[in-house]
Amino acid sequence: MHGLRRTGGLTWYARLSIPRDRWIDAGKAYGKPSGILQERVVSLQTRDLKEAIRRRDKALAHLRAEVDAKLIAAGFEPLAGDWKPDWMEEDALLAEALAARKRIQAVSDVGEDEEGYPDSPMHRLIDGMDNMLSERAAELDGKGLDGAAYLTRFREIATGAATPFGSFLNRWRREREQDVSASTLHMEGASLRQFGTYLAEKQGRGTPKDPMAFLEQQVIEDIPLPVIGEYSEWLSEKGLSPKTIGRQISSLKVLWDWCLRKHILSGANPWAGATAGLKKRAEKMGKTRGRIVAYTADELVLLLKADPDEGRRWAWGSAIHDLMRLALLTGARENELCSLSISRIVNRDGKLGPLWGISVLDTEAKTDNSVRSVPLHPLVRPIIERRLAAAIATGQPDAPLFPECKPGGPGMKRGYYFAKRFTTFRRDVLGVGSDGRKVFHSFRKCFVTFMEMALANGAAACTELVCDHLIGHKPPRLSANTYAAKQFDWPLYSDAILGMVDKGMPKAVKDALTP
């Protein structure tokens, strides 16, 4: 009943109480003969209590704005000063309301009194909460603040009528931690922060200092569908590529899907179809900018013969020298190689055959198919032997083979800083014209190219399926990815690695690899 008054004609009115210490100011502002003004009322034009409660907040806001305008015009300050109780702060309101929701959801809603009205533990708990909220709302009104708005927001959150992001984001993150990599979690967090910034700007609040904290306070049901529909345009205006926009929106779609599964929300996912057209736009942009391609034989010779330490004061020369060769002869990804450790060097006892190998575990694998083992060609075994000996000498149970590759960036990947240093080296050797089309990943493309050339030249083991196994790709053919064995014998993979170098690699490149 806070902020309401009923007349003898049974019509409900909204009633704004003016703080006692402002009665004289308000009386002068309104030109009251008595010299004071204690309250302002306005008809809600309804006799129905529920409808009156729904109309009350807007009416009180209108009255407060009217009184403030009168006070300012008369040379006085508006009703609300700087004072605000701790419990009115948004963070405190959200935390307390969510705690109340947990208590309400934990008790029974079954029960009624002698007259048949609801009288369950839940109803009694809500009644007690409403009494507390009415007292707080009256206290706020007494200071010229919006008590009705506070009461309404607290009650909606506590009773489940409104769902702030902060009420479920931690649950969602905990589940995601079990399903996705650290880098994916980082990307999803960045997407949520970006969305928080967008919502703040759409509400005319500018760029928030903490976008995630702002997002946690937003009620998910209150976001209009047109605002969701305009998000991709806003991202595009920020200069993001179609591919990046697609990732941002996909993260939000995953979150909304989860909310629907958990019955936090109902209805259709508003992000469904939001990425339509982005893939084609990305492909068109890729054609304009050019795709990443393999190094030519001449470029490989230049890279392999160049001294990474020449003219520099850094500690990356040895890593660049070794990792280029490993990438070229294993087809492994950058971070997979930078993350090698003692335990990931396999077949050192020679039980499977003469070639040692490296293993890629699910902690670094990009997909399930990327978990694999790859034999090491004799040309790069000395690199592994040297680094393995140094790692064992540290005394650590599973020391890294490339300790200079410290974890960093999203997901704390060991390849993060190395990628930046290799870019510097590659530009110095091949020039800035290689940017965008020639990267460390190009060694992986060279590996596949050499496998294809070896197969054409008679290396029977270098089949497309074996190549897919070695580089950790899902075979495109249904028969291969559904019915064929997921792993072949070690000797077959070894024959493929040997055949790739023997019959697929240009002689100039082999000469550059030979110590």
Image (cartoon, helix red, strand yellow):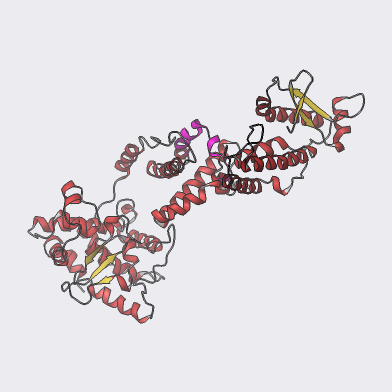
Q: Along the horizontal axis of the image, is 381 left or right of 172?
A: left
Image quadrant for the C terminus?
Answer: bottom left
Question: Up-down: is 299 above or below 355?
Answer: above
Residue 317 pos. (x, y %): 35, 70
Residue closer to the observer: 302 or 365: 365
Residue 57 visible, this orientation: yes
Residue closer to the observer: 80 or 233: 80
Q: Along the horizontal axis of the image, is 179 left or right of 455?
A: right
The magenta stretch is 216-234
Number of on-image labels:
0
Magenta region includes residue 466? no
Magenta-drawn stretch, dominant element (helix, strand or loop): helix
Residue 2 pos. (x, y %): 74, 33
Residue at image position (49%, 51%) is 171
Residue at image position (75%, 41%) is 135
Residue 439 pos. (x, y %): 31, 56
